[in-house]
Image: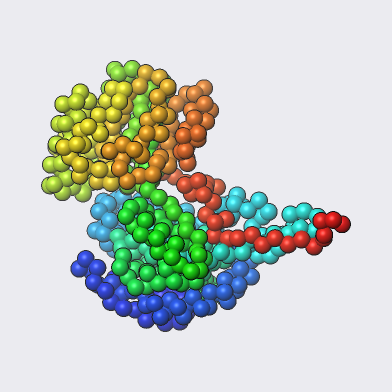
Amino acid sequence: MSFSPLASERCETSKRNYGGIIVEEITENCLTRLLSRADEIQNRLSSVPVEERLGVIGKIGEAWGERYAGGKLKWLRDALSDSTGYSPKMIDLELSLVPSVLNAQGIKRNLEGSFPLGINCLERFKSIGDGEYCWHRPAGPVFIISSGNSLIPPLIPTVLALATGNMTILRPSIANFIGVKTVWSILEEVEGDVAEIMRDALILSYLTHDSPSLEYLLSRSEIGVVNFWGGEPARTEISKRVASNPHHPALIINGPLTGYAIVDSRCADDRAVSALAKNIVLYDQQLCSSPTEAVFVGDWERAKEFATKVGMELEELSQQLPLKLTESYSYLTEGVRRALQFRGSMVFRSGSSASWTLVLSKSESALDESLKAFPEFGLHSRRRFLEMIVLDDYRYVVDFIRRLPGRKSFTGIDGVQSVGICVPEAERDLLAKRLAEAGVFRILPLEDMYMRSALEPYDGMNLAQVFTYAVYRRDKPLSA
């Protein structure tokens, strides 16, 4: 694994051993030299019309789409399958989604939704009233420490940081480094002055957890924003280091969240069956939007019918997108299945393996008590495993979501990010109101709860605004 310098000047690297993998990290001296040019680079990038910045990003997306369509990324699919543990077909699906993230019009819509004054407030002062103006300037340099559960999440904040004019330092996970590097290496091929400025503005390197360069960036460097994606214990360590930085960068944390599904028996048709099964299988429930628990509102018999059909769909999908299983995971899953059955839950399972498990429980979750004997079967260890709790009405649905972060079976998450709903229209508005009051960030149709609109905030935050600060200007005395 090597460092891919996208800045125009050559960077020194140091070799470090990380779990048997030799990693080439950008050195502190090189970072210091690059950051010394941050003001110059950010001023140059901010002087470029936003449409031209987006045009460069769009060209990267178009080039990626052509390579994917031409079968030139099969080597990357296999490499990411090995490093992430996802099946090759799952990675193939992910690679096909990259152009949608690097789509110029999609990013433009996000910026337009983020800045009511219009996107040219990122270029110059824009009038907000009689003799009053505002200019959204880059708050960076921005240092992004991204997660490794998918190739897509590291791209989103990087795109927005560059689009808003920031020098951007991206540290991907070791699991998806090669994918992120391959995406941004296309920037080196884009011609033109704007692309050259962006090359100067983007720095990409993996940094180990005890890296001197990582320590420097967090604790001493003159950066403006740190955007961390992940959970404990890294989150606390990152927070401590940033707090000690004498330059006081802003710390933006996208913490560990999970997804939830709510299905009403009146809507539990074949479409709902396919929707729930698909979201369980995609990314093996490792996305923040992935449903890891569900509620079925209706009677027990109707719930059994629905669960049976979901199980059949899971079986078919698991044949198409096989789960990479280890002997220890299979043994552990079988133990949890038996414990749940002992507690009265009905367990639907894959035919001959631990490829998927669907649990039906009455009124309350049985998983917490069952995990007392299997503490290692925590949320981030479970794959294609869902407990569906059967309730006779909506009274307690939101209570389950509120209590989720404090439960043993969901240790390590901050809360529920996404709720996929399949309920009658008459129930939707009141349910959405109660979910919003419970702190949920996203309320979506069950079918595509994994999809993200260009207009969406990210975990309740507007990243494009977070990566800027507003300069206010007034030409007239208020007393005039």
Q: Is residue 75 visible?
A: yes
Picture quadrant of residue 293: top left
Residue at coordinates 12% horizontally, 47% vertically from top-left? 327
Residue at the extreme right of the image, as rendered: 480
Q: Is residue 160 left or right of residue 364?
A: right
Residue 133's spot in the image, x, y percent? 73, 59
Q: Say if 192 sits above or below 412 in the image.
A: below
Picture quadrant of residue 209: bottom left
Residue at coordinates 23% horizontally, 71% vertically from top-left? 17
Picture quadrant of residue 70: bottom left
Nearer-the-camera pick, 78 or 40: 40
Residue 193's spot in the image, x, y percent? 57, 75
Residue 480's spot in the image, x, y percent? 87, 57
Residue at coordinates 40% horizontally, 19% vertically from top-left? 393
Residue 366's spot in the image, x, y percent? 25, 29
Q: Is residue 222 left or right of residue 204?
A: right
Q: Say if 362 sits above or below 155 in the image.
A: above
Q: Is residue 223 left or right of residue 288?
A: right
Nearer-the-camera pick, 178 or 332: 332
Residue at coordinates 51% horizontally, 57% vertically from top-left? 103
